[in-house]
């Protein structure tokens, strides 16, 4: 795959990601976490897995500032009397690390939304054997 084809590939999937995410996503990319492109509404703090994922992705940066291991989530699900810490480990690696790095430059919300667009690109990458034939 030539550099020109790679650029077209990236731009195509970025366009697809933005198009299918909807107008609401584009106009509120820096101030909200989106649940769905359906309806084009912005709803403040609607419950859902999106906030759980936002929490997990923001751990890397927040723990860096706290001086903890980037994936420490010892305050979450800590319901045991013995205070045995729960840690998800590297389950969301490398995406949470990428989000953590991007959030240092753009902030937590916009970096989370940039990850949503990145997933469209990653889903469109063909297997290595198919790249050689393009």
Image (cartoon, rainbow, N blue to C red):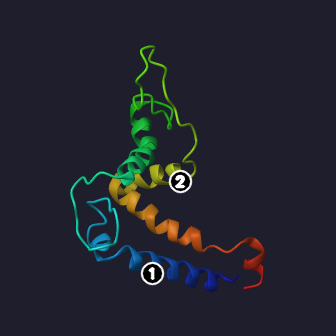
Count every numbered label the image shows and give the total.
2
The answer for how far apart the CA atoms under marks 2 and 1 are is 21 Å
Q: Quadrant of the C terminus?
A: bottom right
Q: Quadrant of the N terminus?
A: bottom right
- Residue 75 position (above or below residue 32): above
Q: Which mark is residue 101?
A: none
- Residues packed near mark 2 inside 10 Å, few (<14), some (14 to 19) or many (20 plus): some
- Residue 85 position (above or below residue 46): above
Q: Which residue is mark 1?
A: 15
Q: Position of residue 69 (x, y in %)?
A: 51, 32
Residue 24 lies in quadrant: bottom left
Residue 19 lies in quadrant: bottom left
Q: Which residue is mark 2?
A: 95
Name of the residue lying farthest toward the top: 82
In the image, what residue occupies the spot 40% across and 24% down? 79
Among the two numbered marks 2 and 1 on one chain, the one whose residue lies closer to the N terminus: 1
């Amino acid at each position: 795959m030539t550099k020109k084809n790679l650029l077209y590939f990236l731009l195509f999937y970025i366009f697809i990601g933005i198009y299918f995410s909807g107008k609401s996503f584009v106009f509120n990319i820096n101030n909200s976490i989106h649940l769905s492109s359906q309806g084009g509404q912005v709803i403040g703090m609607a419950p859902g897995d999106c906030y759980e994922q936002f929490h997990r992705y923001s751990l890397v940066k927040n723990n860096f500032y706290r001086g903890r291991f980037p994936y420490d989530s010892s305050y979450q699900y800590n319901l045991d009397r013995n205070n045995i810490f729960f840690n998800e480990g590297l389950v969301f690696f490398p995406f949470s690390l990428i989000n953590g790095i991007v959030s240092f430059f753009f902030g937590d919300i916009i970096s989370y939304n940039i990850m949503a667009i990145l997933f469209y690109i990653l889903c469109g990458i063909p297997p290595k054997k198919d790249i050689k034939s393009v």
